[in-house]
Amino acid sequence: MIPRYSRPEMVAIWSPETKFRIWFEIEAHASDAQAKLGVIPQENADALWKAKNVEFDVAKIDAIEAVTKHDVIAFLTHLADIVGNEEARFVHQGLTSSDVLDTCFNVQLTKAADLLIADMEALLAALKRRAVEHKMTIRIGRSHGIHAEPTTMGLTFARFYAEMDRNLARLKVAREEIATGALSGAVGTFANIDPSVEAHVCEQLGLSVEPISTQVIPRDRHAAFFAALGVVGASIENISTEIRHMQRTEVLEAEEFFSKGQKGSSAMPHKRNPVLSENLTGLARLVRMAVVPALENVTLWHERDISHSSVERNIGPDTTITLDFALGRLTGLVDKLVIYPDNMLANMNKFQGLVHSQRVLLELTQKGLSREDSYRLVQRNAMRVWEEGADFMTELKADPEVKAVMTDAEIEDKFDLGYHTKHVDTIFKRVFG
């Protein structure tokens, strides 16, 4: 992923240095287990650990691979150069390349998941803080982009919190599912390696043993992992789209923090654009882009092929790095989002009381009118507000059919905003406990 959308801690997980360090640990731990079984001499296993604190030379490994056309063999050759050819004689005993590659990949995905989980927890804290802050800040709820009925900004933040809390649970499940390792040898039969070696290496790396691997770890695990990341990306876009709408000039119920010295446009000095939420919308597309290839990787020929390999070399780092950056950016955006309660009230009153139409409708039915007649009376007066700019309450009070069953005081009572917030506490308890 390009540096513009990357954060160092996640990038480090996918560096060649980190990859080769994990490969080394897999080989060294496997040699320890093989020595304990008496398959290889203990001194050879011990000799491998001479490379424990050595910086592997990525350029040298790449140069060897240019000749061998095989990345694992290139690494093993470099490792032998470090510890000695005789000492490295039994390295990779009974293993196949996929044992190293797949186990390493899952270690990296597990580490990446840990960072993403921490990112999500930070985002949830910001959403909760803003939800509590604006618990009773009235704003208009919209359906189809049209004013519907009053809600609160706190409920908007709370629903985003609940959505991201579900995503946190999905990430934790995805982490657990991907945290497996396999050292079962060619075609996965353990013919040339004892299963206890696999168990030892997985324990040392913090992984579970893959119950049955062919020559690769089953890719349904990876499909589920990237699908979980894709859902998180969709939720990021959901929040970002709401913010983009709220920042529109004719809405302006909230806007991204605009720092001193910031510029919005090279041509129009007045502009303050929702650039962060627009950026997040684009990044979410990149995260979701990994889902279909990950699903298609599930189907491999027989006990293994490498059609999945080129895909995963891209989507592993790119998707986790992008999502890590996006979650961090969204947390900052939510944390500093500027809210305009007065504009929210002004927008809600733009059509002079229309948002209370359902309460009047329901009251008319309570007074004995049929639902059809009640709807007709309310809609007749509402259309004058739409088309002539009339005041809804005034029109209702002047309508003889309405006045035949409702007093002025009863009509006025149906315009109480507090009616719409009476269950906010109940919803908050459901969301936040």
Image (cartoon, rainbow, N blue to C red):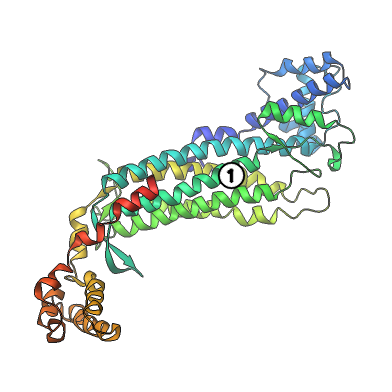
Identify whether 292 is placed above or below 386.
Answer: above
- In the orientation shown, which residue stands out farthest toward the top? 43
Using residue 303 as the reference point, say whether residue 134 is left or right of it.
left
Residue type indicated by callout 1: Val
Where, by quadrant of the figure, is residue 125 drawn? Answer: top left
Question: Quick check: can you spot residue 265?
Answer: no
User: For the point 78% across and 43% down, which residue is it?
Assistant: 213
Using residue 380 as the reference point, say whether residue 100 is left or right of it.
right
Return the residue nearer the eye: 121 or 254.
121
Identify whether 232 is placed above or below 398.
Answer: above
The N terminus is located in which quarter? top right
Where, by quadrant of the figure, is residue 68 drawn? Answer: top right
Residue 350 image offset from top left, x and y in percent: 18, 68
Q: How many marks?
A: 1
Question: Quick check: can you spot residue 218?
Answer: yes
Return the residue nearer the eye: 238 or 365.
365
Residue 117 image offset from top left, x and y in percent: 51, 39
User: For the point 71% across and 31% down, which residue is it?
Assistant: 202
The C terminus is located in which quarter? top left
Using residue 370 as the reference point, say whether residue 61 is left or right of it.
right
Residue on which disc 1 sits: 173
User: For the point 24% across and 71% down, which residue is it?
Assistant: 359
Residue 234 image offset from top left, x and y in percent: 49, 55
Which type of secondary structure does the marked residue at label 1 adopt? helix
Identify whether 147 is placed above or below 304.
Answer: below
Identify whether 376 is placed above or below 248.
Answer: below
